[in-house]
């Protein structure tokens, strides 16, 4: 099913590329856009995870350099029946995390330094269980490819100003400069809508699967509450520069209000926490601390 959804996603984004190419340069532009989309898809499949980790300056760690974090990932991966993923730390004060990779055999989990410094090991384990579920469900392929192609769509839309503006009298451009304006304004929104179609439901599933791995709903619930409060106070500069990657993180790393809320890539943290507390049989007003587990 995940392979089918990935195929549908790639088809939708490829179609968006073709539409952009047609509006910019007619049939010739559509052919060029198709070749560009094909190349982007192939590149994203094999290299998007590496590019993403480099984008955020992630540093790989092992059992010697980060024994507690590495050991937690190893224990949880064994419980989930997954191969040991590569483990990375991103030097960023905003507490957050993401997973990437085209399959469980080529997966990576990255956490920010802010997450390690502000959360207990129980909470970290809850976050890691969520990210490992994304790997187990093979969400990471779709989510990483989406980030790459959505970024490429925005880049192509910006390019339209130069290419279309310089050739707005070209007969191959069916709408002239009007087409350029349409592309520049609507293409990034269309790419964002595709992201929304795949992101929100997967977060709920990853929360549920994370609980199955850790066995403690409140670990993740309390982590999400802390992450939500802190992310509103601490900037993630790299994410603000690359908003197409926002859906990869466990909580939205971007600051936004008003219309931005309509295009949020994540369900509300309040709703996610309520669902997790319901799994634990706890009412929303309670703040009960679970018994410390093996990673505490």
Image (cartoon, rainbow, N blue to C red):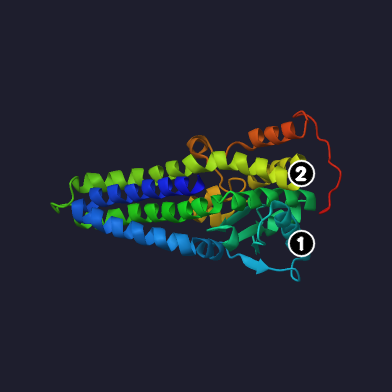
Q: Please tell me whether residue 48 is drawn above or below residue 10 in the rendered image.
A: below
Q: Is residue 63 at least partly visible in the picture?
A: yes
From the top left corner, tell me how far across and down residue 266 is, in percent. Answer: 56, 41
Q: Residue furthest left?
A: 171
Q: Quadrant of residue 29?
A: bottom left
Of pointers 1 and 2, the one earlier in the residue sequence: 1
Q: Residue at x 84, y 49 (%)?
A: 293
Rendered image: mark on residue 171: none
Q: Residue at x 23, y 44 (%)?
A: 178
Q: Quadrant of residue 255?
A: top right
Q: Please tell me whether residue 58 is drawn above or below residue 184 in the rendered image.
A: below
Q: Residue furthest bottom?
A: 64
Whether residue 198 sits left or right of residue 230 in the image: it is left
Residue that label 2 marks: 215
Q: Secondary structure at mark 1?
A: helix
Could you classify mark 2 by the number of other residues whose Cα lies within 10 Å: few (under 14), some (14-19), or many (20 or more)? some
Q: Distance from label 1 to label 2 (Cα)?
A: 17 Å
Could you classify mark 1 by the number of other residues whose Cα lies within 10 Å: few (under 14), some (14-19), or many (20 or more)? some
Q: Is residue 90 at least partly visible in the picture?
A: no
Q: Residue at x 35, y 43 (%)?
A: 186
Q: Nearer the viewer, residue 42 or 1?
A: 1
From the top left corner, tell me how far across and down residue 158 is, in percent. Answer: 34, 54
Q: Quadrant of residue 256?
A: top right
Q: Residue at x 73, y 63 (%)?
A: 70
Q: Secondary structure at mark 2?
A: loop
From the top left corner, tell me how far across and down residue 238 is, in percent. Answer: 55, 57
Q: Please tell me whether residue 11 is drawn above or below residue 109 in the rendered image.
A: above
Residue that label 1 marks: 71
From the top left corner, tell me how far across and down residue 129 is, in percent. Answer: 69, 50
């Amino acid at each position: 099913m995940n392979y089918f959804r990935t195929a549908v996603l790639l088809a939708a984004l490829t179609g968006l590329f073709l539409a952009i190419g047609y509006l910019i340069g007619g049939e010739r532009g559509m052919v060029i856009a198709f070749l560009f989309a094909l190349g982007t898809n192939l590149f994203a499949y094999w290299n998007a995870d590496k590019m993403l980790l480099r984008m955020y300056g992630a540093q790989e760690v092992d059992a010697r350099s980060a024994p507690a974090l590495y050991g937690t990932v190893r224990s949880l991966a064994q419980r989930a029946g997954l191969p040991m993923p590569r483990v990375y730390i991103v030097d960023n004060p905003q507490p957050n995390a993401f997973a990437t990779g085209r399959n469980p055999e080529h997966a990576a989990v990255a956490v920010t330094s802010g997450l390690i410094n502000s959360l207990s090991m129980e909470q970290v384990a809850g976050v890691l269980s969520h990210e490992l579920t994304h790997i187990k469900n093979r969400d990471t392929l779709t989510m990483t490819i989406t980030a790459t192609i959505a970024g490429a769509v925005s880049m192509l839309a910006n390019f339209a100003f130069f290419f279309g503006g310089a050739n707005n009298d070209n007969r191959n451009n069916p709408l002239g400069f009007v087409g350029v304006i349409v592309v520049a304004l609507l293409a990034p929104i269309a790419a964002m809508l595709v992201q929304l179609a795949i992101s929100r439901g997967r977060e709920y599933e990853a929360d549920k699967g994370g609980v199955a791995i850790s066995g403690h709903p409140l670990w993740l619930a309390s982590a999400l509450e802390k992450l939500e409060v802190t992310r509103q106070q601490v900037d993630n500069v790299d994410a603000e520069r690359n908003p197409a990657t926002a859906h990869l993180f466990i909580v939205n790393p971007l600051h936004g209000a008003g219309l931005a809320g309509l295009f949020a890539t994540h369900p509300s943290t309040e709703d996610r926490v309520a669902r997790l507390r319901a799994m634990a049989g706890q009412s929303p007003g309670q703040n009960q601390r679970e018994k410390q587990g093996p990673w505490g």
